[in-house]
Image: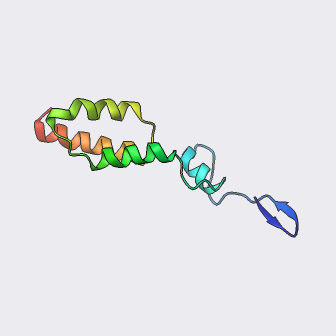
Amino acid sequence: MSWRDDRIIAESPAFPTFGADPGRILMHVFGSPEIIGRRAAEFLREKLKQEWTADNRDELARLVEEIGAGWPRAKLTEILSRLDASSGS
């Protein structure tokens, strides 16, 4: 939606919303600058920077199970997969 000449104008989203990622809808339909809170975003940024090893693999696996869908989870799942592949798990 937007304002034009003191009127609210409803506009169709630029992509199909049925079955779309909720974060994409928040950002592109509702204009949300972020799809998660600042504190959660900072926490996940730190976890993405963390050095993951066989010693803290279980912590990473728990984290992947606890966080919602989205890019951070996909990236952490990728790290977990690489870690498992290198250890032969």
Q: Is residue 35 toward the left or the right of residue 89 in the image? A: right
Q: In what quadrant of the picture does the N terminus appear?
A: bottom right
Q: Residue sitting at 38 percent across and 44 percent down?
A: 44
Name which residue lies at 37% across and 31% down. 65
Using the rendered view, name the quadrant where residue 18 is placed: top right
User: Residue pushed farthest front?
Assistant: 39
Vertical side of 42 occupied by 58: above or below: above
**Spot occupied by residue 63 in the image (x, y as percentages of width and height):** 34, 33
Report which quarter residue 2 is drawn in. bottom right
Identify the residue at horizontal 66%, vertical 54% (top origin).
Answer: 29
Q: 86 or 40: which is nearer to us?
A: 40
Work out whether 53 lies above or below 59: below
Q: Position of residue 40 (x, y in %)?
A: 45, 42
Q: Residue at x 11, y 35 (%)?
A: 88
Q: Is residue 7 left or right of residue 80?
A: right
- Direction left: furthest residue: 87
Give the total number of marks visible in the rendering: 0
Residue 55 lies in what quarter of the image? Answer: top left
Image quadrant for the C terminus? Answer: top left
Query: Percent x, y for residue 12?
Result: 72, 58
